[in-house]
Image (spheres, rainbow, N blue to C red):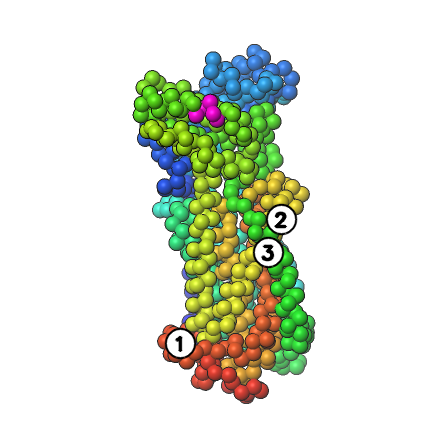
Amino acid sequence: MAVFARWCYRHRIVVVVAWLVVLGTVIGVDHTVGNAYSNSFSLPGTESAKALNLLSATLPKQSGDSDSIVWHVSSGTVNDPSVRTRITALLQLVAKAPSVAAVTSPYTPTGAVQISRDGKTAYATVVFTKLAAELPRPDIMRVISLTKAAGKPGLDVAIGGQAIEQASYTPPSYSEVIGLAAAAIIILIAFGSLLGMALPLITAIVALGTAIFSIGLFSHVASVATMAPTLAALIGLGVGIDYSLFIVTRHRDGLKAGLAPEEAAVRALNTAGRAVLFAGGTVCIALLGLLVLRLGFLNGLSISSAATVLLAMATAVTLLPALFGFMGLRVLSRSERRRLADHGAHDVHKTGFWARWSAFVARRPLVLMLCAVVLMGVLAIPYFSLRQGLSDAGNDPAGTTTRKAYDLLAAGFGPGFNGPLLLVAQTGSSADQAALLRLEHSLTTQPGIAAVVPFPSKPGAKLAIVEAFPSTAPQDARTSQLITHLRDDVIPPFEHGGTLRVYVGGSTAIFDDFATIISGKLPLFIAVIIGLGFLLLLVAFRSLLVPATAAVMNLLAAGASFGVLVVFFQWGWGAKLLGLGKPGPIEAFLPVMMLAILFGLSMDYQVFLVSRMHEEWVHTGDNEHAVTVGQATTGRVISAAAAIMICVFLAFVLGGQRIIAEFGIGLASAVFLDAVVIRTVLVPSLMHLFGWCNWWLPKALDRRLPHLSVEPVEDAESRPVSEPAVRGPVAPEVPQP
């Protein structure tokens, strides 16, 4: 690592130009070929997938996405001639639009059910030729523009549905700017140097820009969700600034200790740089661990997020040492340079808040540990009421066409009309058709069903469709219970004794199945990432307790942050205040994505903190001294890095998108708890209580494990750490540059 760092420092012009060429190339290619983002996902083997496959095979024109045009009059009724003429003209234009298969108007003999009882609201169903994820965006935008143009004073017209929601999605344009501004202020306060502040921001911007445009190119060869760039920005800004901050801090410490700029840069990369590579590697492993779930929707998100972290690591260990070469001592503030010139080298960690705090933790480890455990346990309690699902369009930002359509439908017909269930039936005989008629009648009497509408079918057709409208909203827990009740209790008696097969499908059922599948695979995912993390730390620190402690801390932080999410979004204690919708389920895929990200971010702090402690341990053999010094020397940079991440994550809440806001608040709360409670109190307290056992490893296991050190080779001593060392200070070796 030292040789590589020295090469980047001495060939700084080549390194900077190379990164600018890479960034310019991906931007140019992206602008030329564009992107191909898609929110498609499949759930093979589920009942909703079987219903969709039957529709696609038998009635392809009815298997595309179904959206709704809704209109409401403030006076009169929707049957007034002026309204009827205007809307009929709109529906005719929509029916002729590209990618539209059919439009079902309420102004037909069979359309009476599409007009509300008070006559003030009506809707038309727009059936597209393909599923939402497969439709060309310009075709959907054409339908949206036609719908918007039809409105006038006294006549509200809106359109909603999956296709409309996906095409209308626009990532928040200013969240990155707010996050960068907050990061700049925090770094400036921490460093007191404009140039020192600029270094982490420059590397993070280069990494993030390269990542986002590369993800756009990657979407041409794999299915990547539309939210991938926003998620990459959220992750990339956080880890990109953090990784650079760790290295810049170590470089500044080297300069204050009297090292020449080049030697300080080499030492920073050979210590903090190694920790960054190791921590970033664990983040990538955690994100790529999502691949074991075998869900196509998550594959693109995991690969693009991992690529963003890789680029953040690459800029931190290549671009930073090159920039160090241009800046020399100016990485320090003017007052720091004057002090260095007047008083010479000095240790910046012997005094100050973190030195006093680390000494306080060493004196009161048991009390502090118990307080921290109680706090984290209380915060984790709401996690046990976590309900996974999909928030509906009722949580979209106010003023959007999807939100207007949702509210108009809910007010005119009931919330369940925003997510009807499609019962797709295979009828092989007249007896099956008779059984289906009895089932339709039974559905009208079922609690939780507001209306039942059978689709017209040709005589002798082997496939029939029945639309059932729940009385509750798509995201309501009672709707999920209704789906289960229909599948397990209501439908089976009518299938018994014949060849009739009825499958409950539709978008609401699809997302309910998606939540069920992910919930079932969550334990496997947790086991994979915890197991891999344990093995990595075991090899790196030659210890059993260090990786075991990290695993427990990661789970504790995740439980507490999920508890915050449940309180905020599921219970609604704050979501309405920020304009993020009403109480509802946590997005089905969010727990696994958040676990992957949180695991990686927690490992960042764990590696940076424990690697510094380990450096002192191998020098002195004194556990109390090692833990105290490690916490004192890393406390400031970990707290600054956490503050930056929290600001970056919270900046994405301002965009008004509920899913991104869930990520923002969940990750911000997790980082806050991790930095303030776990790394500042809980981990140091436990390591003080464990004593030399922190670094114990059975000799037989030590011989079989590969050797992978987070610290540079010249800092490691030959004595094994698998046995307790003699307590007391030992004269440290002087590492060679």
Tell me the CA gap for discs 2 and 3.
Answer: 10 Å
Q: Toward the viewer: 19 or 407?
A: 407
Image: magenta residue range: 439-443
- What residue is disc 1 on? 701
Q: Position of residue 535 (x, y in %)?
A: 43, 68
Marks 1 and 3: in contact by CB < 8 Å?
no
- What residue is disc 2 on? 567
Residue 454 in view (yes/no): yes
Q: Toward the viewer: 227 or 41?
A: 41
Say few, some or many: other residues with alpha carbon within 10 Å of mark 1 (under 14 / 14 to 19 / 20 or more): few
Q: Residue furthest top?
A: 81
Tell me the CA gap for discs 1 and 2.
Answer: 44 Å
Residue under the point 61% across and 60% down: 376
Image height of 670 relative to 683, above or below: above
Q: Position of residue 712 (x, y in %)?
A: 46, 77
* Secondary structure predominantly adopted by residues drawn in magenta: helix
Residue under the point 48% across and 78% down: 696
The amino acid type, in three-letter code, at marker 3 is Ala
- What residue is disc 3 on? 380
Residue 60 figure quarter: top left
